[in-house]
Image (spheres, helix red, strand yellow):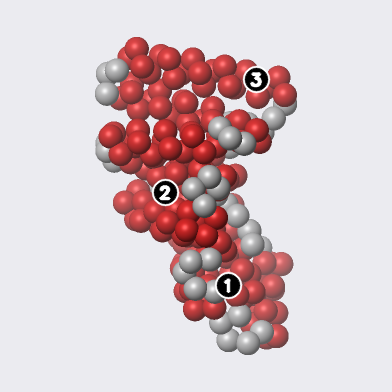
């Protein structure tokens, strides 16, 4: 934490106003707060970083989308699902515009949006988003853990609606993925946050 704060101080001293490097340093301080469970401060830092990035790089920039996604994740962890949905939707819109419809990070951002819709019992929207996310992440071998997570999320989605047969099928697919991942000693499929908390 001390190093991250020192980086902000140095960047402010040597940089011109609205230099994106200041925003990057503030974003990284926010990540440090988030790792310590200090979500309110992480959210404050995220807002500061976003304000600077939108001035220096513009809203439609890949780095801006990453900070939107970080902010969405911390809002999700704090229980503010409605506000989190707004931030992750902004991240999705930016990412798709600048990186295309098959971008791997777009797929992971859609995971969070689908999860948030499910939390709000918006099951139709959640199902649509999760299938779109699965279509993207399944194109990348290194995203096997996220494919497993989506199958499990779809299982929970159908279970919540008493669609037990559909739920069972998706839980089985998730289980098969988990076994395959474990045999490869890959990253845990439960490590949902690792795709969102993104230093720049």
* 112 sits to left or right of 53: left
Q: Quadrant of the N terminus?
A: bottom right
- The span from disc 3 to disc 2 (Cα, nearest Å) is 29 Å
On the image, the x and y values in percent for residue 86 come to: 35, 56
On the image, the x and y values in percent for residue 108 come to: 52, 43
Q: Quadrant of residue 170?
A: top left
In the image, which is nearer the foreground, mark 1 or mark 2? 1
Q: Which mark is residue 180?
A: 3
Relative vertical location of residue 126 with respect to residue 103 in this rendering, above or below: above
Residue at numbered disc 2: 76
N-term-proximal mark, 1 vs 3? 1
Relative vertical location of residue 172 with respect to residue 19 in this rendering, above or below: above
In depth, the one of 133 and 181 nearer the eye is: 133
In depth, the one of 15 and 93 nearer the eye is: 93
Relative vertical location of residue 19 with respect to residue 120 in this rendering, above or below: below
Residue at numbered disc 1: 23
- Can residue 59 be seen by looking at this rendering? yes
In the image, what residue occupies the spot 40% across and 27% down?
Answer: 154
In depth, the one of 123 and 76 nearer the eye is: 123
* 79 sits to left or right of 70: left
């Amino acid at each position: 934490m001390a190093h991250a704060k020192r980086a902000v101080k140095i960047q402010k001293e040597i940089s011109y106003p609205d230099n994106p490097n200041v925003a990057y340093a503030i974003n990284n301080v926010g990540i440090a707060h988030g790792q310590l469970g200090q979500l309110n401060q992480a959210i404050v830092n995220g807002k500061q970083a976003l304000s600077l990035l939108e001035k220096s790089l513009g809203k439609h920039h890949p780095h801006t989308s990453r900070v939107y996604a970080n902010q969405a994740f911390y809002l999700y962890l704090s229980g503010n699902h409605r506000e989190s949905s707004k931030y992750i939707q902004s991240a999705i819109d930016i990412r798709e515009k600048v990186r295309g419809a098959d971008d791997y990070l777009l797929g992971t951002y859609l995971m969070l949006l689908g999860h948030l819709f499910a939390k709000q019992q918006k099951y139709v929207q959640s199902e649509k988003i999760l299938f779109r996310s699965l279509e993207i992440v399944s194109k990348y071998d290194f995203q096997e853990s996220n494919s497993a997570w989506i199958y499990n999320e779809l299982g929970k989605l159908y279970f919540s609606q008493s669609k037990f047969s559909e739920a069972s099928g998706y839980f089985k697919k998730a289980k098969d993925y988990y076994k395959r991942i474990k045999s490869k000693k890959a990253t845990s499929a439960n490590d949902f946050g690792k795709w969102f908390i993104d230093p720049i």
